[in-house]
Amino acid sequence: MSDRTRWSPAAGLVAVGWLLTAGAVLWCVLLFASGADPAGRLIAGVAAVGLLLASLFGTVARPRLAADAAGVTVRGLLGARPFPWSRVQGVRVVRMRRLGRESSMLELDVRDAAGVERLMVFGRLDLGAEPEDVAGLLAARRPV
């Protein structure tokens, strides 16, 4: 087993996000240049900003989750937050059925440095892997 295990959004998915962002920005510019109605410009602007934020998150928050002998590290837009194993209260997979489709989410119960409990939830898109597989690898990493 390697010293550090990492999970990130799939690079191809992030690249598609950036392509969609470029398309949405181009759409927005064309609408503004053509003098389209304000509602259309608003929709294009919201789409462009939403895609930009999602693509930025997929790029900056890499790796999204990492684990080693010391604990887990969760990365977001504002940086990485390490949690030693002593502060990881639980690791579990939650399965839910929505819109006729079953999906799984990885939940980490952690306590931050101030002692505040936090629930961190990761889906397949966050991890680039099945949450069940990640939970198994985290359980193997976690000291008894």
Image (cartoon, grey):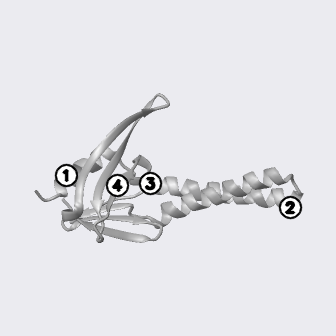
Mark 1 or mark 3: which is in front? 1
Badge 2 crowding class, 10 Å Cα cut-off, few under 14, some 14 to 19, many 20 or more, is few
Quadrant of the image for the N terminus? bottom left
Give the Cα distance between marks 2 and 3.
Answer: 35 Å
Image spot of residue 123 (x, y percent): 40, 48
**Front disc: 2 or 4:** 4
For disc 3, the marked residue is: 10
Q: Residues within 10 Å of mark 3 (few under 14, many from 20)?
A: some
Q: How many marks?
A: 4
Lateral position of residue 26 relative to residue 59, left or right: right
Residue 55, above or below 123: below
**Residue 137 seen anywhere in this rendered image of the structure:** yes
Q: Residue furthest right?
A: 35
Residue occupying image coordinates x 69% and y 56%: 46
Between the C-alphas of marks 1 and 2, the distance is 55 Å
Q: Residue beneath label 2, please?
A: 33
Image height of 101 relative to 78, above or below: above
Q: Residue 52: which quarter of the image?
A: bottom right
Neighbor class of circle 1 (other Cα within 10 Å; few <14, some 14-19, many 20+) is some
Give the mark nearer the N terminus: 2 vs 4.
2
Q: CA distance from mark 2 to mark 4?
A: 45 Å
Q: Residues under labels 1 and 3: Cα distance?
A: 23 Å
The nearer-to-camera label among 4 and 1 is: 4
Q: Residue at x 51, y 57 (%)?
A: 14
Camera sees residue 5: no
Q: Earlier in the sequence, mark 1 or mark 3?
A: 3
Would residue 59 be found to the left or right of residue 135 on screen?
Answer: right
Lateral position of residue 22 relative to residue 119, left or right: right
Q: Secondary structure at mark 2?
A: helix
